[in-house]
Image (cartoon, rainbow, N blue to C red):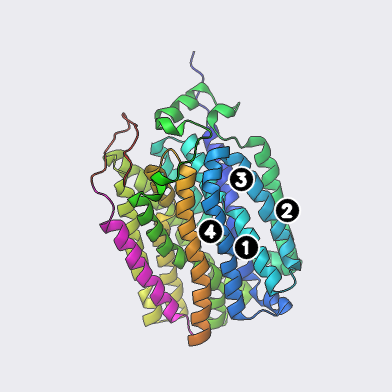
Amino acid sequence: MNSPRTRVRWLTLGLIVSLIVINYIDRAAVSYAVGPLTEAFDISKSQYGLISSAFSIGYMVFAFLAGPLVDRYGARRILLLGVAVWSLVTALTPVAGSFLGLFLARVVLGAGEGPGFPAATRTVSRWLPQQERGTALAMVGGVAVAGSLLIGGPVVTQLIAGFGWRGMFWVLALVGAVWFAVAWRLLKDTPDEHPGVSAAERAHIAAGQRDEERTSKGRVEWRPVLVNRNMWIIGIGYFAWGFMFWAFMYWLPEYLSTEYGLSITAVGLFSVAPWAAGVVGALLGGVLTDRIFRRTGSPRTRLVIMGVALLLSGASLIPIFTAPSLTVSLVFISAGVGIGFVTGGIWWVAAIDAAPGQPGLAAGFADAAFAGSGIVAPSVMGFLVTTTGSFSSGFVLMTVLAVVGGGALLIFPKRDEPRPTLDDPGTLADTR
């Protein structure tokens, strides 16, 4: 008698999604405490831009290094270590005491959060078949990210109102500690290691995996990833989208407050719209990429979807610097973010397609490009705001980068990729 198919893979996905929500609320929390934090530590706007970039220094380095560590030692161990580090640093942030202390705290926070997406990508590749990954990684890389920023504004501002800006950081650190305790018991590297997974569910997962995706750990080989053409194209596109994302994450509250005189609680409420649009866009992107992959079997379709989305996202920002007003800004920032988030989970699916045997390393490569834009975007925006007294030139730069990234994704990938069907889920050829 066959055992019923369990759904432990979705419980595992839920743990990863909740982790990313906590991850992004923690990293974005500083943007809602700009006023009292900069006053307490005597920090200027340009220094705040550097502090925002500091996070991405640690994030970029450890996202890249965590990829091979995840492939070598498994996702569970690296994730638990990362959560412990970033929760501790979140608790210490309110007592950093100075520009230098806060800068270093943000670097270490980025280092702790760096393994998140490489580990999440490997977990999805080991726990879900190919035909479910678009939606799953849209939940991880899109819905969880946009959703965290959607609820993050109201939650963080209310925490500040209720506990003060220092208390807000301590509450967030406690939430990270709770996740650590739950994941210690429930999170496993592969279905074979989880006692709750039935034989039917293991068979369902294995039927949609390549042979090299059925291992918990393995040898790390750098060259297949570093010489892979599509990996570099993914990196260019992700940097372009990342610039827009990080700029809005760190500067949207300040933009709404400075340009339109909104209070801190009003900023939290008005900030909801772009990230709500991001949730919708991420869900759309995940469903779309899975449906098209089922019909075509072509991994290149993921890159086409991302390229078109980036072009449309950049075009959506044009009205903001040509006819600015609060209504125009909210509508078209929301459109740009929402369309951009169509790509939210597809970057990770594309990374798995490019290097199925080493999804952690491939995801770390892509995430390093994303983090690189996180270093550049906050500082550049801070410089532009300081020197021009306006955010308009920043919006222009976002549009230009979106066109460059979208064009790269549409024009340069290798075109003669194989087209496997779901009945033949064999290894996809390496696209180099």
Q: How crowded is mark 2: few (under 14 residues within 10 Å), some or many (20 or more)?
A: some
Residue 147 image point, x, y percent: 53, 56
In the depicted view, which residue is nearer to us: 391 or 271? Answer: 391
Q: Please say whether residue 412 is one of the residues in the magenta stretch.
A: yes
The residue beneath circle 3 is 79
> Which residues fall within the magenta stretch?
389-415
Residue 142 image point, x, y percent: 47, 53
Q: Is mark 3 on a helix, strand or loop?
A: helix
What number is the disc on residue 174?
A: 2
Q: Please say whether residue 43 is one of the residues in the magenta stretch.
A: no
Mark 1–mark 3 Cα distance, whole angstroms, equals: 18 Å
Question: From this viewpoint, which residue is outermost toward the left?
Answer: 416
Name the image quarter holding residue 112: bottom right
Going by the numbered disc 4, the residue's amino acid type is Met
Residue 110 image point, x, y percent: 60, 59
What number is the disc on residue 60?
A: 4
Marks 1/3 in contact by CB < 8 Å: the verdict is no
The residue beneath circle 1 is 107
